[in-house]
């Protein structure tokens, strides 16, 4: 946990990496700072000096000269115009820089998520990650641009006002007492620090619970069918309401400390001004003499009040930094080698030796797996649910790394290849097909992004998807809908199979890829697969035994171990588990 102080050095340490995001917009940011300098100087120094120099000439004894009066009066709107333009420029340019920084920061966090291993997502709620990417990045951006600008603008106004007070005190000795009124300034630090600590703690609670709320919302919308099927509407509404109540409670605490700070600082400022007025009355100063002093004194306390708001924003930003850095500093346990070897297309044999893997430490899912799959062969994995079949194939593209043992392709351990190169040579068709809310054409083209429309259509024909695609009014330009909602399960799987045809990788993994196909479509797919598997190393996972007839070898798995391997005839005779699984489907 970082040390919480009001000093600038912890601020610099915390946000330094994010200030680098200002480099592409350094010109506009410098412009914002210059405008802030002008604004602060015009406020802190300009107004008191105007009250001291200009107003006495207007309201002094005798009738002022007409042109002098016009010039003096005209100077006031000019000064306010300069201050207003500087304030506009400062805010506009800061907002522009803020938007550009936000884009960079969100892209940086999003890109980091793309490189993290699947194990990271297994331990973190999707909704919470969404809140960090979309919400917490905004908190950091606010500090990097808005607060940074105020840290220039407000100190300049404060120092300019102090300069005005010193100048006025030098003009008349009886004004010196006003400087003692500034002794109240150090007392303002106490409520700022106290409120900052309180706000940081509450802001963390708010942002963490905002992540929980996003998770609940994402989960509910993703399971709309199940919610209605089990009549869970009331339960879900109650759960959502409870999370909102928690956020509201902590949010009101943030509001409480934020709202209390400004009047507290104003009260301290009033004490200082009251002391100044008391001494002025004792010294029998005239009101026109006190006006520039009180203006300068107010201009010193106004930045202090805003310092409180700045400090609160920094504390909320620190809470956002902690949540963002959870992603940015997350360890990529699946690392690329420093000097990767190229993938050898002529060698696609797969070997797993002494393989042990667990999702949770101490609970192995695979135990001492020793398997050899010759290049160009078709291997089927069978076994009851939970046997470890999907885990077996997830190790091949290095979605996960083994706890111990080795997995080799072409005689090379997987860690010797770069992840991109390895995965570029493996096609995967999963049981749960994921389609993006894009056209069917582009969803198939994910198999190979540079493929032509003709190549996409040819892949769809191989997967027997062309006919149903052309039945849509927009054909290949039809939107698949979110997660492929406009397509049936069988249609989605045929599009996924078309991707595999298009990618044309030397290693093909079919994880329950035909589970949602009707008998006619499955028969067509079998014909297509018989062509696709030629010269490729193929691993099939299927509960429907009709899909494994083309297999050269069958591996039977149970409870994370290889129970038996061989041909269908051998296993049907020698292995009870295989025979029972086969007979249950009444396949002759």
Image (cartoon, grey):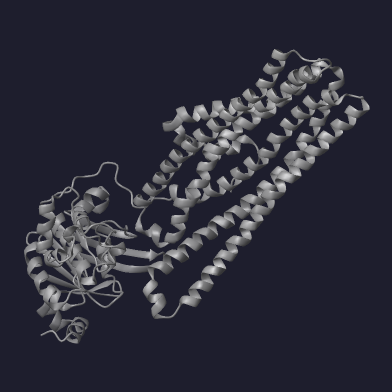
Q: Based on the displayed image, in which of its 4 quarters is residue 121 positioned?
A: bottom left
Residue 99, image x, y percentages: 45, 40
Residue at point 79%, 19% (across, down): 56
Residue 514, image x, y percentages: 18, 71
Q: Does residue 349 appear anywhere in the picture?
A: no
Total marks shown come to 0
Q: Based on the displayed image, in which of its 4 quarters is residue 300 positioned?
A: top right
Q: Quadrant of the C terminus?
A: bottom left
Specify whether 199 is left or right of 564.
Answer: right
Specify whether 160 is left or right of 182.
Answer: left
Residue 51, image x, y percentages: 75, 23
State whether residue 331 is above or below residue 569: above
State whether residue 113 is above or below residue 232: above
Specify whether 9 is left or right of 287.
Answer: left
Residue at point 24%, 71% (across, down): 489
State whether residue 502 is above or below residue 78: below
Residue 158, image x, y percentages: 69, 29
Q: Nearer the viewer, residue 177 or 9?
A: 177
Residue at point 40%, 62% (across, down): 122
State whether residue 406 is above or below residue 142: below
């Amino acid at each position: 946990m970082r040390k919480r102080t009001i000093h600038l050095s912890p601020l610099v340490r915390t946000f330094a990496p994010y200030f680098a995001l200002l480099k592409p917009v350094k010109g506009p940011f410098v412009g914002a700072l210059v405008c802030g300098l002008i604004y602060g100087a015009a406020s802190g120094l300009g107004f008191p000096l105007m009250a001291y120099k200009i107003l006495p000439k207007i309201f002094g004894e005798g009738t002022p000269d007409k042109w002098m009066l016009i010039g003096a009066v005209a100077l006031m709107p000019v000064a306010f115009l300069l201050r207003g333009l500087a304030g506009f420029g400062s805010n506009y340019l800061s907002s522009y820089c803020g938007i550009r920084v936000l884009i960079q920061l969100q892209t940086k966090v999003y890109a980091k998520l793309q490189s993290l291993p699947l194990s990271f997502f297994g331990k973190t709620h999707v909704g919470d990650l969404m809140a960090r990417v979309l919400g917490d990045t905004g908190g950091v951006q606010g500090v990097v641009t808005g607060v940074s600008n105020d840290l220039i603008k407000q100190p300049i106004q404060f120092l300019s006002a102090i300069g005005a007070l010193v100048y006025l005190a030098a003009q008349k000795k009886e004004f010196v007492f006003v400087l003692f009124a500034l002794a109240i300034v150090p007392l303002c630090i106490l409520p700022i620090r106290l409120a900052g600590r309180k706000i940081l703690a509450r802001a963390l609670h708010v942002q963490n619970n905002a992540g929980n709320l996003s998770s609940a919302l994402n989960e509910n919308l993703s399971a709309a069918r199940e919610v209605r099927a089990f009549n869970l509407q009331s339960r879900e509404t109650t759960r959502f309401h409870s999370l909102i109540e928690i956020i509201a409670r902590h949010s009101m605490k943030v509001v409480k400390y934020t709202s209390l700070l400004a009047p507290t600082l104003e009260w301290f400022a009033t004490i200082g001004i009251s002391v100044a007025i008391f001494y002025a009355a004792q010294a029998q100063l005239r009101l026109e003499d006190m006006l520039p002093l009180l203006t300068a004194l107010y201009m010193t306390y106004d930045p202090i009040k805003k310092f409180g708001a700045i400090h609160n924003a920094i504390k909320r930003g620190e809470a956002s930094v902690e949540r963002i850095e959870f992603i940015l500093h997350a360890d990529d346990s699946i690392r690329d080698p420093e000097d990767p070897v190229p993938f050898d297309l002529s060698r696609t044999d797969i070997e797993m030796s002494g393989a042990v893997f667990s999702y949770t430490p101490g609970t192995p899912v695979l135990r001492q797996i020793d398997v050899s799959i010759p290049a160009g062969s078709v291997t089927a994995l069978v076994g009851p649910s939970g046997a470890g079949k999907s885990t077996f194939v997830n190790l091949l593209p290095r979605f996960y790394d083994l706890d111990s043992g080795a997995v080799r392709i072409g005689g090379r351990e997987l860690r010797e290849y770069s992840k991109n190169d390895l995965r570029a040579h493996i096609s995967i068709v999963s049981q749960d097909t994921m389609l993006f809310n894009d056209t069917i054409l582009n969803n198939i083209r994910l198999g190979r992004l540079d493929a032509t429309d003709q190549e996409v259509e040819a892949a769809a024909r191989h997967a027997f998807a062309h006919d149903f695609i052309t039945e849509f009014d927009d054909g290949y330009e039809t939107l698949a809908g979110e997660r492929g909602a406009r397509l049936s399960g069988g249609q989605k799987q045929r599009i996924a199979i078309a991707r595999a045809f298009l990618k044309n990788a030397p290693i093909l993994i079919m994880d329950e890829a035909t589970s949602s196909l009707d008998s006619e479509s499955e028969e067509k797919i079998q014909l297509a697969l018989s062509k696709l598997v030629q010269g490729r190393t193929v691993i099939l996972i299927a509960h429907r035994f009709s899909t494994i007839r083309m297999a050269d070898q069958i591996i039977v798995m149970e409870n994370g171990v290889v129970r038996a391997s061989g041909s269908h005839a051998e296993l049907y005779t020698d292995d009870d588990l295989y025979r029972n699984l086969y007979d249950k489907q009444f396949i002759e």
